[in-house]
Image (cartoon, helix red, strand yellow):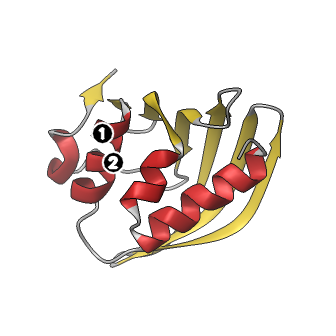
Amino acid sequence: MTNPHEVVAAYWAAAEARDWNAFGALLAGDVIYRGPQTREQVRGREAYIRFNVEGFAYDWHITVQRIVGEGQHAASWIEFTAEQGPQAGLCFFDLADDGQITQITDFWPDLYELPDSRAHLVERY
């Protein structure tokens, strides 16, 4: 799969399904995740999967509002719903030639601090 729209749609579908094998298959081994608001950074496929499994260990759901993509870049607008209510998010993706996701940059309009529950899963920049 190399179409950026399809890759990002599969990424969010796997995340919503908690299908961490399918999710991981979409990621390059050296994927980098960045959350600029909290200065979170996670390096590598296994670390990023762990970040998602352990860092969000509560009931949550994702509804994709829009995905746009061209070449090796894509962006998505999602609604993330958890115990604190719905929150919009913008996520930008860089893809390798083979379609694997190499970088993810996540923006959330609502300000927040890095939760203690996932501080051990990230490095700060």
Q: Which of 30 and 73 is in front in this view?
A: 30
Please state which amino acid type lies under the numbered disc 2.
Ile
Where in the figure is residue 81, as x and y percent of width and height? 46, 75
Whether tag 2 and tag 1 are in contact, CB under 8 A, the answer is yes
Identity, as a three-letter code, of the amino acid under mark 1: Glu
x%, y% of residue 121?
A: 21, 40
- Label 1 crowding class (10 Å Cα cut-off): few <14, some 14-19, many 20+? some
Q: Which residue is depicted at the point 79% across and 45% down? A: 3
* Direction from residue 102 to residue 98 in the image, left or right: right
Residue located beneath label 1 in the image: 46
Q: Position of residue 5 (x, y in %)?
A: 76, 52
Whether residue 35 is visible here, answered yes or no, is: no
- Where residue 69 sits, quadrant-wise, is top right
Secondary structure of the residue carrying tag 2 is helix
Residue occupying the point 21% across, 48% down: 118
Q: How crowded is mark 2: few (under 14 residues within 10 Å), some or many (20 or more)?
A: some
Question: In this view of the protein, can residue 66 be seen by the observer?
Answer: yes
Q: Answer above or below: position of 97 versus 5.
A: above
Name the quarter where the C terminus is drawn.
Answer: top left
Q: Position of residue 32 (x, y in %)?
A: 45, 29
Check the image and report above or below for 111 versus 44: below
Seen from the viewer's position, the closer of residues 118 and 4 is 4
List the residue tagged with mark 2. 49
Who is closer to the viewer here, 85 or 92?
Answer: 92
